[in-house]
């Protein structure tokens, strides 16, 4: 699969509730510009909202990088959320629906994974967390697991 | 020797600028009164503008005398901080941008500089250069103080508007006897949802409402936090004996909620406010029937 990566189009700070609003608005704008359908727009914006809130609440703040990408002629949007918080100790547990270390519903990380096409987490205890998600305008090329 | 002579005559440039400002404050104030910054703010009388200019010159003289040209926190500025804030606020209200205000502040320097050059016409070039530099630094600091006050005034305004928004954006509407609705618009963060819950529960008591409709047509994103707030509000209303309906769930939002994995089955939902109202009326035992043909109401 050939990925061509655009330059990082924006890097938004995540340090307050207001920044979450900016993150959502930016992702909504970007997906609309790239030609995402309304459902895919809403899904990616919601995933961004969950992940940005995670970075804020659990990671003590961080940032989101937003990059337009193409793969085999298919356009997509890649979002990278990074924080320098305590990291996730048990990733499997964190991805389990209903598990929360705070007061939330415990659906954020697992829910975000289901809302996007590609999802990866890079975390180690004590050295922060980076979550990378990508959604494509239509299904990405290549075989995909049935949900 | 000529060199010694100049050294004796020469005073510290900062002090010299301070003395100059104090000595020429009337002339400077008169010239500033004609500058855009003061002219556009003090429109009632020129005397007022001169008065304001004089206060600023005196503050600058005090700062220079204290030798704190670059210190925006210098005591001298404290006296005029409020006046500067009012001036900046007034300019901002009449539509000037920060850049414009900054440019207008910059325009205050040349008239003073001219007067200073005039005063120092006999002094050696090197000394004149030092004095004009000191003045430039001082005026730069004044501009910084002005910008700081302007921006903090803006921040206060934003904070106040944010509080006002919380109140305004959550009206409770009585739709029918015993039926109230809250149209939610915008971001449903923790602070907003707290206000929504309080106003809704108050309305349930006041209006003796049996059914409360939360309409989320105007909420752009429903993530797990928003869903959690909605469920809490519904649960609280239920404790008070009111049934809660969440309406305005658009197709894209419905699909997102399902993928997110949030279980809203404990919450009664409807696609539109009209559907929710129809359901509520039905629950109240009211039926809407079309009027018989030929008998308009």
Image: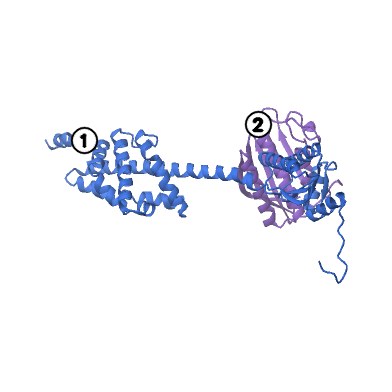
| Looking at the image, residue A40 lies above or below residue B236 | below
Q: Position of residue A70 (x, y in %)?
A: 71, 53
* Inter-mark Cα distance, 1 to 2: 56 Å
Chain painted blue: B
Whether residue A22 is visible: no
Residue at 43% x, 50% y is B90
- Residue at (21, 44) in percent of width and height: B125
Residue A77, position as x, y percentages in the image:
70, 50
Q: Which residue is at the front of the view, B5 or A100?
A: A100
Colour scheme of this structure image? by chain
Which residue matches tag 2? A85
Q: Secondary structure at mark 1?
A: loop
Q: Image quadrant of residue A37?
A: bottom right
**Chain at tag 2:** A
Query: In what quadrant of the picture does the C terminus of chain B appear?
Result: bottom right
Q: Is residue B107 left or right of residue B230?
A: left
Where residue B120 sits: x, y (%)?
Answer: 20, 45
Tell me the colour chain A is drawn in: purple
**Parent chain of label 1:** B
Figure check: B201 above or below B96: above
Q: Is residue B21 left or right of residue B174?
A: left
Marks 1 and 2: CB-CB under 8 Å? no
Mark 2 crowd level (few <14, some 14–19, many ≥20, 10 Å Cα): many
Q: Is residue B1 visible?
A: yes
Q: Quadrant of residue A48?
A: top right
The mark found on residue B11 in the picture is 1
């Amino acid at each position: 699969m050939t990925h061509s990566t655009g330059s990082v189009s924006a890097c938004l700070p995540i340090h307050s509730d207001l920044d979450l609003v900016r993150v959502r608005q930016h992702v909504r704008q970007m997906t609309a510009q790239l030609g995402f359908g309304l459902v895919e727009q809403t899904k990616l914006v919601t995933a961004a909202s969950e992940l940005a809130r995670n970075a804020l609440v659990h990671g003590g703040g961080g940032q989101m990088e937003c990059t337009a990408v193409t793969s085999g002629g298919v356009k997509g949007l890649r979002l990278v959320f990074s924080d320098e918080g305590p990291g996730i100790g048990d990733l499997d547990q964190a991805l389990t629906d209903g598990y929360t270390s705070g007061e939330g519903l415990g659906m954020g990380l697992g829910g975000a994974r289901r809302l996007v096409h590609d999802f990866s987490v890079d975390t180690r205890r004590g050295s922060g967390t980076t979550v990378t998600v990508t959604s494509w305008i239509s299904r990405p090329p290549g075989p995909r697991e049935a949900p | 020797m000529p060199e010694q002579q100049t050294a004796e005559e020469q005073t510290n440039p900062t002090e010299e600028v301070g003395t100059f400002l104090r000595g020429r404050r009337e002339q400077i104030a008169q010239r500033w009164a004609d500058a855009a910054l003061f002219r556009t703010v003090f429109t009632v009388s020129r005397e007022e503008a001169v008065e304001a200019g004089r206060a600023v010159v005196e503050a600058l003289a005090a700062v220079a005398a204290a030798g704190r040209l670059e210190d925006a926190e210098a005591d001298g500025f404290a006296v005029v901080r409020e006046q500067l804030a009012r001036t900046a606020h007034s300019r901002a209200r009449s539509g000037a941008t920060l850049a414009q205000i900054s440019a207008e502040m910059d325009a205050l320097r040349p008239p003073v500089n001219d007067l200073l050059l005039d005063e120092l016409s006999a002094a050696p070039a090197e000394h004149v250069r030092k004095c004009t530099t000191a003045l430039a630094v001082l005026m730069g600091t004044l501009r910084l103080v002005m910008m700081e006050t302007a921006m903090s005034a803006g921040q206060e305004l934003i904070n106040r508007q944010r509080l006002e928004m919380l109140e305004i954006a959550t009206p409770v509407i009585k739709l029918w006897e015993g039926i109230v609705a809250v149209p939610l618009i915008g971001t449903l963060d923790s602070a907003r949802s707290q206000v929504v819950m309080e106003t809704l529960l108050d309305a349930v008591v006041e209006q003796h409402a049996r059914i409360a409709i939360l309409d989320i047509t105007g909420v752009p994103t429903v993530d797990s936090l928003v869903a959690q707030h909605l469920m809490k509000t519904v649960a609280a209303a239920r404790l008070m004996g009111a049934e809660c309906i969440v309406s305005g769930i658009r197709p894209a939002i419905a699909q997102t909620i399902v993928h997110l994995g949030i279980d809203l089955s404990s919450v009664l939902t409807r696609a539109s406010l009209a559907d929710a109202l129809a359901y509520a009326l039905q629950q109240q035992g009211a039926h809407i029937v079309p009027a018989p043909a030929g008998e308009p109401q």
